[in-house]
Image: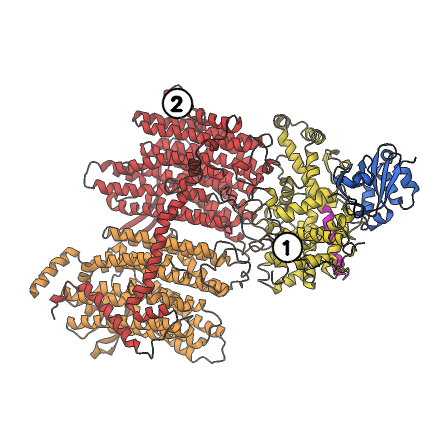
Amino acid sequence: MVGADIFAPNSLTGSLTGFFAQTSWLIPCYPMLGAAFSIFWSPALIRRSGPRPVGYLNLLMTVVALTHSSLAFVAMWHQPPQFLQLSWLQVADLNLTLPLELSALTLGASVVVTVLNLLVQVYAIGYLEMDWGWGRLYSLLALFEAGLTALVLCDSLFFSYILLEILTLGTYLIVGFWFNQSLVVTGARDAFLTKRIGDLILLMGVLALYPLAGTWNFSELALWAETVPANDAIAPLTLSLIGVALVWGPVSKCAQFPLHLWLDEAMEGPLPTTILRNSVVVATGAWVLVKLAPVILLSPVATGMVVVIGSVSALGGSLIAAAQIDIKRVMSYLASAYMGLIFVAVGSAQPETALMLVLTHAIATALLLMAVGSLILNVVTQDLTQMGGLWSRRPITGLSFLVGIAGLVALPPFGGFWALLNLLNDLVDSGQWWLVAVVMVTNAVAGFALMRMFGLAFAGKVTPSTTRAAEPLWLMVLPMVAMAGFTLHLPLVMKQAELLPNNLSLVSPMAIGLLASSALGLGVAIAFYILERITRPEKLLPPLLNRLLAYDFYTPKVYQFTVIALVDKLSQLTDWLDIYVVDGLVNLVGSVSLFGGESLKYINTGRMQFYVFVMAAVSLALGLYMSLYFLPKLPV
Amino acid sequence: MLSPLIWFPIAGALLMACLPAKLNTAQVRGVALAISGAVVLWTIGLFTQFDLSLAGFQMREFMPWLPMLGLNYDVAVDGLSLMMIALNSLLTWIAIYSSAKTTARPRFFYSLILLVSGGVAGAFLAQNLLLFFLLFEIELVPFYLLISIWGGTKREYAATKFLLYTAIAGILIFAAFVGTVWLGGTLDFSYEQALSAQLPISAQVVLLSILLVGFGIKIPLIPFHTWLPDTYVSASPPIAILLGGVLAKLGTYGIFRFGLGLFPEAWSLISPFLAVWAAASVMYGAITAIAQKDIKRMVAYSSIGHMGYVMLGGAAFTELSIVGAISQMVSHGLILALLFHLVGVVETKVGTRQLDQLNGLMNPLRGLPMMSALLVLSGMASAGIPGLVGFITEFLVFQGSYSVFPIQTLLCVVGTGLTAVYFVILINRTCFGKLDNERAYYDKVTGNERAPALVLAALVVVLGLQPNWLVHWSETTSRSLVAAVPMAQDVRIALQADLGRLD
Amino acid sequence: MPSIVDIAVQTEGFSTLVAAVQAAGLVEVLATGGPFTVFAPTDDAFAKLPPGTVQTLVDNPPQLARILKFHVVAGCWKKDDLMTQHELNSLESSPIPIRVSPIFEVKNATVLAADIEADNGIIHVIDNVILMG
Amino acid sequence: MITTADKQATTSLPPSNHEFAEVVHRLEAGGSMLPDNPENLKQIIGIYKAYAVPMDFYWRDLLYIAEHVFLNPLPAFKYFISEKYLNRPNAYAGDNADLRIWRGEADAHPELREFMAQGERKRKLPRLFHHLWHDRVNMEFAEACMLAMFWHEDINPTFNAYLETDEYRANSDRAIRAYFKGNPVMLGLYKLFPDMFLEQVRRLSYYANLGLFWEVMAPVFFEMSDLYDEGKMTTVPEAMDFLVNGIFAVAGRPIYHHVYIDGECYEIIPKSQGFTWLYEAALPYVEAVFYRTAPFRGTKSYNAQAGQVPADQKDFHYGILYADVFPVGSAGIPPTLLMQDMLHFLPDYLIELYQQHGRGEDDMLVQLGITFQRSMYNVTSAVIQALRTALLYPLDDSNLDHLRANRAFFEQQMDRFKRPEARLRDIQSQNYR
């Protein structure tokens, strides 16, 4: 294993690099520092010069964070995980210390996060060169970077919850970046509330778990989970409830059905943030889910739910993606779909495979979105039907696009293939054939959706929007190409990181089946959209189905007529009650005035006494009610 | 050490009253600021002197007054009082700072505020039931004036409503106190006397219930809350800050000090009622807030909900939940004050509080960018986003209460979700969106309007990141409070015996 | 019979046009090529243009040529032939709108003298320099 | 000399019943869309001057990029314009100008040089520092204007047609090969994807196009400012007429694209193509930048299903004549870059004016943005009057049909401002600041 020799010769650990590992808790601090300094470039403070220095500053901080995590990663390579404890709050019997897990895995994850952030921030310099909001954008990007690195390092459910909540707020603010635009505003709102719902259900789980397990540390939770089946002290119902609660946080983070809509609406945000969101931010949910897997797997109900939600999201997401005309939304629903596959992996007890999928998906998605951005920036539309014939003039973007597809869909030898193959093999071993089918179909449909997107944009006839299209600024092309490089080399990295089980071979039936499913999806799309031999499927499909997919199964409507309507009506009701009934009961006079609308003076009217009387009566009544049981027996 | 907290502001109030009339508002305001500033400094000094290890009261000051009535000047401080005192001193200063430089009849205005501040401080320190009651009643009239003279639309109506409700509350509280002392068989209203009084549980329950209703009106808990929206909305921002930030705390303080403190057995007995009551308040406040179209009213309703968390913590009376509840009083005070201040600024600049007319204030040049940013911050703090003080206090309450009242606690968690809903509505409509070209010629925000907001925001963030500085002061006090409360089942046994004796 | 150029040179009041044609290097074409129909602006027509206009054009022959070509149409178009025509395609390739009645107008110019015959075409004298667009 | 201002609209036409009848009549009277009053005059002249200084950088740098940076794959320093181009004599200023429009000097404007040297920090620091400190001219804005002209493919037919010819292809091929001489990688790439490079060159041709356009406008605005300071320009119509005359004077200016590769000149678009300033630069520029451009991402959603962005380029109306200036300074509002550029060079009398209104210092960007909007309505008026002069009839024409034609033309121009977002209504009043 050559890699091992290159990385971290044991002599080094404990020395300088060891020091970097010990100080890994600094990694999230660098970006936070950058974010803090960004305040000095808020529009209120700078008048005569522009906000761009913020960008460069945060870029620098990201470089520092990246360097540190890489050094720490090297130090921890092939080392047993170490744990750091940072005491935060000690009150009464509650002792909140932040445990950090320093292992090749967590530090490797933080390297991935920082690398992506670096590229995205460079990309943003190009993509948002016309934008004046750099201060907010970069400080928020830094916030995300800090949150993500902290999340991967932290080993505590409680602090993970805290970080997820903060990232929820971050999502609200970063989606609301262009707050002058109406859809941005609603999008930010829905993203925030949807994620918050998940967070709070998770919080319920967090609250409920502690009294039972007595810890929030993932590692200790895992140990506790092993002991649970032994003692039947805990009712399975409780376990199921807790498991279910814990699952809903990730469900909302990963934009899984039925909480998937926010990701679509979040597409209103600036594209560089989309890159980050779809590649790593949604993956935070998956990460936490993986960490919680031991607890969730305790309850068949919760596990079943994970698998079902995952499968539905995978199938539904990929199908919807295949029908979108908005290029960014294709990507958003594919993110839901792949997160769905990750859910399936966790639900079928394959945390390693899940993480592998997270990695391959993150890299490939980031690349695809960078390509998408470089497209929409100078065709001035996101509407696929208005694109076409870009290949000859936009080959770099086109190639990156293809590489991205190869990295995401199961095409050997690229990353996605091995991850999915892993998943399938285990599913077959455990005989869950219907899940095998889910994965196969999802893979095929996703392949179709991606190739369709490519075909519509790059093949076909030139349209007015694409008549004039040159490759954009180098600041966007460069990160894109770098990303393509990563995607191409990912398999090697995975091999070196020993993520690829040795038993994987290309001649196994599963491998061939998987390859076939990809080939099917891609082939059909090529036939439809590149060779254009057959009429477009939207003409073949029944219009109803077509609309159903294009409009995302009308989920917005569903929300509107269920949850939103409920809360709205309920609040209207209580408001009415409050004004006319409660206030009316507690003071009739008040109610009279409120009906009459004009204010009234109690003083020097005879009503006063009556009013006092009512007040007293009501108070007395409640007093009685509360001591009803004892009243007859008063010792007086 | 303690008396100055009471008498300095009151003396200041008198001083203000006899300031030469030729002084303009700004100068009068300056004087008031100086006085309350001094109080704040004194409070900080108090913190340095406070001994964390002592469970009971400290720095006691005693002076006979009307012994035959059992009324004595008897003040002391413990963790609970300390927090309340700090809140009172700070928010008084903030309120004066946030008052407009153009306030009419300034000397009267500021002297009233100082008077109130002194009275409230006394109430928080009083070791004598009668003394507490007197000081509790003292602030009633000044507030009536502050609302009815300097308030907004419908101020007489609101002021009167406030007056009547508080009066009723006073009556009930007084009744309960007298009852306690009388049943205790003495004429001494001193707190420890009341503590030592051995009352039959049934009597305790009745007294406690009356007390709860009395203070419940003050907090307020549903269904006694309807005075609150009207009052808070009609009151000018500084007064709203005092009402929501400090006065409401008199209610919860009273419940903890006299309810939980004097009738522990009864408390443990009816705590399930309280928990339900608290959860109901939380849900009710949050849901009603969602329907509001006036941002000040929305914030007012949010206050109802948040006081519910305090009640929940009290009802659960675990050490953690009590610490949480006390800290929640402080954090709610800070956040609410910040919100009311910002709403006030928005109203003065934009000239409306209606959600459907506000928009785009986040715009850096023509909007109110910093105020919007802080509005987002305070809204999120109130919605319990981690990293801000609102979260950790609520979390402590939840964590402390869950083991005792799981269902009610989870309901309150849902409540925080709904809180997020209406604050997002508020922020979206107010800060986001595009500016209306017809109206967007607002004046710029002055440093005087910024400063108090920044101070509060800083506290909200710092205490959110480093909650130790908030929670530790009340830890020992809570421990002793909880220690006094026996387990519910023991109480029931005792109760059976007690009732049996009656039959 | 004299060529278009000869007529322009001999006739009074076309000195600017002639100078322009020379500057643009179109003499050869207009003298020998054809047949053309030329809408010839008078010196007054050129004078109507704001100061510097003509100068800049004369300094830049290709651009000048382009403007002049807009005044030239392939073939012989007498007034009577134009009765049915609403527009002609100029050598510059953009179309020239034509109205014959009530008065003979070429775009926003009025024809002062129509149907002057040359051996390689027709000249219509106009009172405005016409411009594309 | 055209002096429409002092002419009276003939009364023989019935009054127009167009929504903007008032404006139409003003135009027929030789006026501007912008009401004629001293404050408007002060505002527009002041902003012309503040606009001309950065414009003096824009055109020089655009030409520098088009002619020297050319196809540099990593043009990190494309805004670091060479001394040569700073000294490049403007063809319409200085002693040996082709046509002297501005009486000032032909090289870079002194205020521009000072700003480039010291920035707003008023400290002599390395250029790189000023650049990174964002204390510089926002060249991105100029490029955005260029891209607008480039992307709207239907507004410059003759020029675009030439970009597709084999001649153009051959010209650029020679230049590309020369530029990448001894660079096998890029030459290899060129072999693989010739169209990619060709498209880049096309974009560079538009760099040159816009550069040559603005080279004219800068001195025009400088001269107007000087005339105003000398008290020789006293009404808004006068300002407009000066622009009309300017447009005619340089209408025949050649538009071309030359590239200089180690000293040798490659004519990608030779002057001999006969492309003129008016037809191939000015009119497309007005259409692309004043009227159309593309929706700012901070104000419109690009979501295909939301349908906020029209499918047809003709329906784009997001230019300065339509833009909402109030959000300037916040995210996703590109004009902020231009406003910032002008902020550095405001004449004192404008600063004074802005101090008296709104938030003074604090919302100056918005105030000057609205001033800029007013001034651009005046420029558009000049274009409309120029077209009327070129294609239609004098305002005092005796022929009623001709006057009707003029009226129809004006009304048809005004129709474009019927859209709700058009600012023509607002600029009629001084309360719009």
* Chain coloured blue: C
Image coordinates of residue D171 in percent, x first then y, are 72, 31
Residue sitting at x 32%, y 45% = A202
- Give me the C-alpha separation between circle 1 and circle 2: 63 Å
Q: Which residues are the magenta region?
A: D214-231
Q: Amino acid at mark 1?
A: Gln
Q: Which residue is mark 2?
A: A513
Q: Colour of chain D?
A: yellow
Seen in the picture, residue B408 relative to D73 is either above or below; the reply is: below
Which residue has dot 1 on it? D373
Q: Quadrant of residue A333?
A: top left
Q: Which chain is orange?
A: B
- Tell me if I can see residue D249 in this picture: yes
Residue A212 or D411: which is nearer the viewer? D411
Query: Relative to C46, is A301 above or below?
Result: above
Q: Nearer the viewer, residue C89 or A534?
A: C89
